[in-house]
Amino acid sequence: METYKGYPASRGVAIGKAMLYHPYTPDLSSRTSGAAAASRLAAYDAAKEQAGRELENIQANMKVESPSKAAIFAAHIDILNDVVMDGEVRSLLKNEQLVPSSAVAEVFTRYADILSNVDDSLIQERASDILDVRNRLMRILEGHLEQSLADLSEPRIVIANDLLPSDTASMNRSMVMAIVCEVGGSTSHTAIIARSYGIPALLGLNGAMNKVADGKEVIVDSCEGILITGADDALTDHYIRKLDKYRKQTAIIMRYADNMPVTTDGVRIEVGANIVSANDDLPVIAARADSVGLFRTEFLFMGRKDLPSEEEQVEAYRRVLSAFGEKAVVLRTLDIGGDKECESLHLPQEENPFLGNRALRFCFSRQDIFRIQLRAAYRASTAGNLWLMLPMVSSLGDIKRAKAIIADVLTELDQEGKKYCHNTKFGVMIEIPAIAILADQVAKEVDFASIGSNDLCQYTLAVDRMNPAVTDYYQSYHPAMFRLMRYVIEQFHTQGKPIGICGELGGEPEAAAALMGLGIRKLSVGPESLPVIKKLICTHSIRQMEQDARHIADFSFADDIFSYLSSQYQMDR
Amino acid sequence: MYTKNTTITNDTGLHARPASDFVRLATQYDSKIYIGKAENDVKLDAKSIVMILALALKKGTVVEISADGSDEKQAVDALIGLIESGFPEDD
């Protein structure tokens, strides 16, 4: 029996069979073979047949759980049987000594490029379907086993090096019992998606792929942050009971999911949700949340080679805005930097990506991209209640500059006769210490602000939140954090401007209580945390929270603050 | 050679399931079948889903379908009929 520690990115417990996920990457080079045309054609035919069977299988499995996903595979079958591409592959195999896999690569890649250049975003999306079928054929021709999270037919605990947006977007959620990755942290893409899907996840577990045997039973405890292999009966029983208890507690907390968040002494708190446009349970979230305190837009730019067009962005933003109706949706402009993989943006390779040309700074240096996003956001504003928010603001100069660009963009829209909502609120993230210290001045220049506690902590404590070597230094309950946030809250209240929090801290009941005690009345959390935060609010009083906030005001150690708050706010999770 | 024109009426154009239904019908006929926009000379193989998608036939486009072979008239009429039906949703 072995126990391994990982970062518990998404709470939960799972006991099940491991699946080692090795995504196949095709070799697109042009390879030749001395074999006769007949045998190479035969290999291609056999691969086509197998691909067809695989796709029929997946489609049949999917029809029940998700008819819309099943349609994607129907399209793949059409592409597989396309007469023109098939004819060209055969031609190549007859006339040249190409290996079947390379012939497929050549033809399919070419047609995928043709489609990605068509002036219709829906057709452009089909280009990736051609690439998917190409990869399937090449994978079969090269003798690799099929591995897809999309067509998991039995529940598995997925073990991988990392998961791409395309993996998490297409995975069969009901069959993924838990996720374990070798890389990643609390704010990585996989973490966010796992939390929003309610799937337990352990990240940053070095060497996981070598520590787990495919098909063997493992236990994931992502409340404590451990992975257990080869557990004996006694331990497995213990976890079966823990899982049961966890489910029961979750059910109790879930009873608060649809409640209105009002404290026992009658103070109404606005509880919003942090979302990405890929969230396909928007109606559920819209029913449970008062607003969207953070609509992350970088997901539109990730996992693809080309940039999202203005129209594509307008559509994505409108979809979210209309799902929330009158409820505010705080759209954060592109917040990404060199620490993330993002082909479409050609991000600079930097020594210090967190201190570099990222987010708003990147947008200032690529105004072509920035303006399109701003145009799309304003054009979409007529579909709902848009609040625009800028990340990574480090000076009033940044605010002034952004406002000038926005004014110019709006003039452009006026000239084109494109409609937008004129009272769209404008705000900033408070995540850089400089701007937190100047909160009094910032509050005069904006309509609202939101505290980005993850980055605020990182920058204030000078700790790289993605660096496992210094995790102990990333103390989100550090007394300096509370002092700084208290100042920001007070200044915004003095100016009569709304101040909220959208960082992870707001989703932790212990911290949320202290923050409400300091005066915060707006919290925005991951959708999975809505129930527990509502439970916190509905079962406690502001008076108590204020008392507790005062109590910790002079503490010197993060541990003491956390101990005190967790003893006061036992949420039985 | 037999040719006929019609206008695309359904909202998403000849895309996804409509394109699939179109190709499925076209392949049932022996004749060589071509599809293209009436406004230009680009005519592509109507039995190829990739060609149909590459044409990006949106709502409002006037499309020309032509066929050459033993069942050319039936093929063209059937395909025109399918487009004119607007590809109703079956579920």
Image: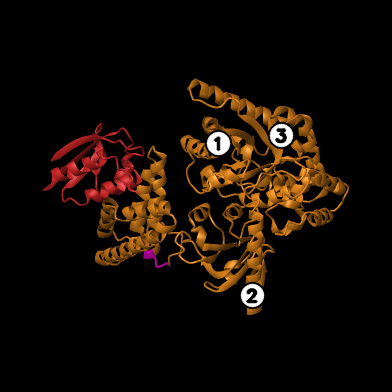
Chain colours: A orange, B red
How far, Cα to Cα, is label 2 from label 3? 49 Å
Q: Is residue A411 left or right of residue A186?
A: left
Residue lying at 39% horizontally and 57% vertically, measured from the top left? A63
Q: Residues within 10 Å of mark 1 (few under 14, many from 20)?
A: some
Pointer 1 residue: A325
Residue lying at 21% horizontally and 35% vertically, measured from the top left? B5
Q: Amino acid at mark 1?
A: Gly
Give the SS element for disc 1.
Answer: loop
Residue lying at 76% horizontally and 46% vertically, measured from the top left? A264
> Which residues lie in the magenta part?
A140-144
Where's residue A21, x and y in %?
51, 64
Pointer 3 residue: A498
How far, Cα to Cα, is label 1 from label 2? 47 Å
Q: Is residue A392 magenta?
A: no
In the rendering, which numbered label is found on residue A237? 2
Instruction: State which tag comes first along the sequence, 1 or 3.
Output: 1
Please determine if labels 1 and 2 lie on a single subunit: yes
